[in-house]
Amino acid sequence: MTEAPAQAPAPVVHPPLPLSQAMAYMGAAVVLALAQGLGQGFVAANIPPIAGDLGITTTQASWLMAAYMIPRASLPLLLIKIRTQYGLRRFAELGIIAYVAVAFASVWITDFRSAVVVQALSGAAAAPLSTLAFMYMLEPLAPEWKMRLGLPAAMAVMMAGPTLARVVSPALIGDGGLTGIHLTALGLAMVSLMLVFRLPLRPVPHMKVIQPLDFVSFLLIGFGFAGLTIGFVMGPILYWTDAPWIGLLLAASVASLALAVAVELNRAAPLLDIRWLASPSMLHLTATLFLFRLILSEQSAGAPRMFQTLGVAPAQMTGLFAVIFGASLLGGLACVAWMRPNRVGALHLVALLLIAAGAFMDAQATIDTRPAQMIASQALIGFAGMLFLPPAMMAGLIQALARGPQYLLSFVIVFISTQSLGGVLGSGLFTTLINHRQAAHYATLTEQLATGDAPTAQAIATRAAALAAQMPDAAARGAQAAAQIAQDAAAQAYVMAYNDAYLLTALIALGAAFALVLHLLRDRMVLRLAPPVQADKTQPDATP
């Protein structure tokens, strides 16, 4: 079968909307972004309450996160082509109707199986919302403001959604279980439905771009992404070597992705332009996005889980996450003020240095550390995250559009896969490192806490004396005191493990910053040594 290369239509430049309409469209973008961001954050932030509500273990509840992330990582492969072939309005309306239907179904979840199915459908329905949020933010703006204002504004709200979910979840749960969370998600979905139908996107040309082999490539890539997601979500929980099926699944995922690459390289109209993605500039951008997503796992998989281990309730962490949310929005505003194509490297350097500084501060944590002590460091990391991602996406979009509209899909897939898969892989690797370091530190501490050791014996005696009023039996008091000290040692081992991970994150950020400085210096030297371009005097001056 031969495929005719289908060129995507050139982007249509619409005139900017009046201020009142522009504010309405940008407000709709905020609602759409928060709807999808809160939906993802509600799952990640409430695994223990979800497990209790469904009567399952937290290990089983972790499957819900995997079920949600699988379609989020793979479905965007086809969304751009579907939108191009069937039109923006139909894409927007059907996408938001599906999201409302799934949000309504989530209210009636009663068992684990239905929860997994609904979460998979939620991830699939939320994927179009990310695209719609971008479109509604960019729709009313003049071309010169789409990159400078629309892109960072949309990303700031979308990336801050999961953090905001941790702020509002304790108040929504209260004493009523997860009903408040489900109803909030349903309410946002219904408001989004109203906004999409009330504020239609302006039409753009559409044409037939979907080819039969697109579905073959999609299935191969989708299976590969799904396998990686499941492996890195469940691997640290079940422990990699104790679950042989994880290794088999990861191997099958890599084989599926390799087969997808082979198929795409031999197509006239590929779903992904592998040759362009393998070019040095795109490999550099992909590695940068992936590395940064891994580094940011310090915030998503670090502080929240450390405080959970130390017994800090979610309601006690709302202030910390509120500050992170505000810092992320400030990072988006900073991009609006300073983001330019020639400043991408400088903004990335500042972001890496801020992350290194925040991670070094976190590495001083102790068993008595509480959220208030990490506000400054986590705010730096939240600000740096938004200082990095919009310039990186702008650089990729400029490269893609310079090659032609058909390259836009390839870049969007790179960006989404590095962020979705990078977040899952980063969290999995971070958790695995914590587990290994905690076991090593705990073994060392238990050796030091041998009962024959004089300081340990004194500590046990002190604790036993404090329990005298509650436990008259001396042997029972001694056993209880020893158990308390062992429990403190386990908590201390976890804190030491997290400190190791924070320190490693800081060192990686500093190493990346050093490599970036060398790269910028090389580019500057090449520019200075390049011969000046001579204007062709035989041609008329075309400068407007």
Image (cartoon, grey):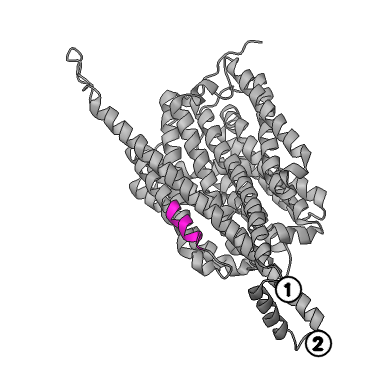
- Quadrant holding the N terminus: top right
On screen, 539 above or below 109? Answer: above
- Quadrant holding the C terminus: top left
Residue located 55% across and 15% down the image: 5
> Counting other residues with Cα less than 10 Å from the Cα at mark 2, is it few (<14), some (14-19), or many (20 or more)?
few
Q: Quadrant of residue 519?
A: top left
Q: Amino acid at mark 1?
A: Ala
Q: Nearer the viewer, residue 504 or 17?
A: 504
Dominant secondary structure (helix, strand or loop) of the stretch shown in magenta:
helix
Residue 354 in sight: yes
Label 2 secondary element: loop
Q: Position of residue 28 (x, y in %)?
A: 52, 50
> Counting other residues with Cα less than 10 Å from the Cα at mark 1, is it few (<14), some (14-19), or many (20 or more)?
many
Q: Which residue is mark 2?
A: 472
Residue located 81% across and 56% down the image: 56
Q: Position of residue 262 (x, y in %)?
A: 63, 19
Q: Which residue is mark 1?
A: 482
Q: Residue furthest top?
A: 2
Q: Position of residue 22 (x, y in %)?
A: 43, 48
Q: Amino acid at mark 2?
A: Pro
Q: Nearer the viewer, residue 264 or 365?
A: 365
On screen, 272 above or below 167? Answer: above
Q: Quadrant of residue 520?
A: top left
Q: Give the residues drawn in magenta, as a range.
A: 355-364
Spatial CA distance of label 2 from label 1 is 16 Å
